[in-house]
Image (spheres, rainbow, N blue to C red):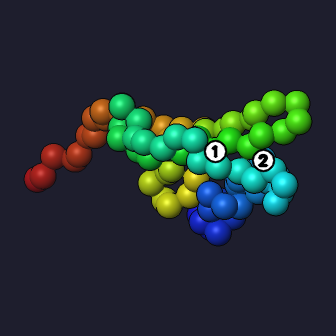
Amino acid sequence: MDTGEKSLRVLVDKWLAPTPAMPARVSQFSRTRLNRRRYVCVEVSRPTGSFAIFFFWHGDGSWCVFPPEVDRPAMHAYPRAA
């Protein structure tokens, strides 16, 4: 995946469109409880009120507005050695 297209800065610009008069700020950051993946909440103030979006880090180095899939247990069958 092209991580340049999914960098946190690019996504904040795309989704929140901050301006010098109304800059975006990180209001929270931590890790999810389930799989310990990083997330960031970015907020921007508008005349109509504040607006915030959570961004989630994915294992390939990209950031998205949806959390990564949870790794689930899986069974694999292997051919028996002769």
Residue at image point 66% right, 61% down: 9
Q: Quadrant of the rendered structure where residue 27 is? A: top right
- Which residue position holds label 1? 42
Q: Residue furthest right?
A: 47
Which quadrant of the figure contains the N terminus?
bottom right
Give the mark nearest the N terminus, 1 or 2.
Answer: 2
Q: Are marks 1 and 2 in contact (CB under 8 Å)?
A: yes
Q: Nearer the viewer, residue 47 or 52?
A: 47
* Secondary structure category for the residue under label 1: strand
Residue at image point 56% right, 58% down: 62
Q: Amino acid at mark 2?
A: Leu
Is residue 77 shown above or below 63? above
Query: Can residue 55 be seen?
Result: no
**Crowdedness near tag 1: few (<14), some (14–19) or many (≥20) residues, C-alpha within 10 Å:** some
Drawn side of residue 4 relative to residue 78, left or right: right
- Which residue position holds label 2? 16
**Crowdedness near tag 2: few (<14), some (14–19) or many (≥20) residues, C-alpha within 10 Å:** some
Q: Nearer the viewer, residue 74 or 68?
A: 68
Drawn side of residue 31 relative to residue 20, left or right: left
Drawn side of residue 34 relative to residue 80, left or right: right
Q: Position of residue 78 (x, y in %)?
A: 23, 45
Residue at image point 84% right, 55% down: 21
Residue at image point 11% right, 53% down: 82
Q: Position of residue 31 (x, y in %)?
A: 40, 41
